Amino acid sequence: MKLEKCRRCGGEMKQYTHEGRNIIGVPGYISCCYCMRCGNQVEAFDPDPIKAEKKAAGYCNRGIYDLKKS
């Protein structure tokens, strides 16, 4: 899924996915989209890696970010 530019600063967004666990310990995949310029990021979890990537990209493209790193 194509990532739009960061809604806060206009920087380039990157995405990566890795194995992990959710907050209650269920194994699956965590996908993270983050801005190369300002550090805004959003993560999504799903047992299926493709679905995790689509969720994170969808949140990112709508401007829903988890936190801003300084």
Image (tube, rainbow, N blue to C red):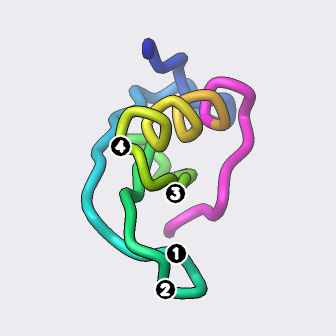
Q: Which mark is first along the chain, 1 or 4?
A: 1
The answer to whether 60 appears left or right of 31 in the picture is right
Tell me, yes or no, whether the two marked residues, 1 and 3, touch with CB atoms within 8 Å. yes
Q: Which mark is first along the chain, 3 or 1?
A: 1
Task: Check residue 65 for magenta coloring.
Answer: yes
Q: Which mark is first along the chain, 4 or 2?
A: 2
Mark linked to residue 1: none
Circle 4 SS class: helix
Mark 2 nearby-residue class (10 Å; few <14, some 14–19, many ≥20): few
As measured in the structure, the alpha-carbon distance from the residue carrying label 1 to the one carrying label 3 is 7 Å
As measured in the structure, the alpha-carbon distance from the residue carrying label 3 to the one carrying label 4 is 8 Å
Residue tagged 1: 22
Residue tagged 2: 25
Is 35 located above or below residue 39 in the figure?
Answer: above
Residue tagged 3: 45
Circle 2 SS class: loop
Circle 3 SS class: strand
Image mark count: 4
Q: Choose between 45 and 38: the one closer to the eye.
A: 45
Circle 1 SS class: loop
As measured in the structure, the alpha-carbon distance from the residue carrying label 4 to the one carrying label 1 is 13 Å
Quarter holding the N terminus?
top left
Residue tagged 4: 49
The residue at 40%/27% (across/down) is 12
Tell me, yes or no, whether the two marked residues, 3 and 4, touch with CB atoms within 8 Å. no
**Boundaries of the magenta span:** 60-70
The residue at 44%/55% (across/down) is 47
Q: Amino acid at mark 1?
A: Asn
Is 5 located above or below residue 57 in the figure?
Answer: above
Q: Choose between 42 and 30: the one closer to the eye.
A: 30
Mark 4 nearby-residue class (10 Å; few <14, some 14–19, many ≥20): some
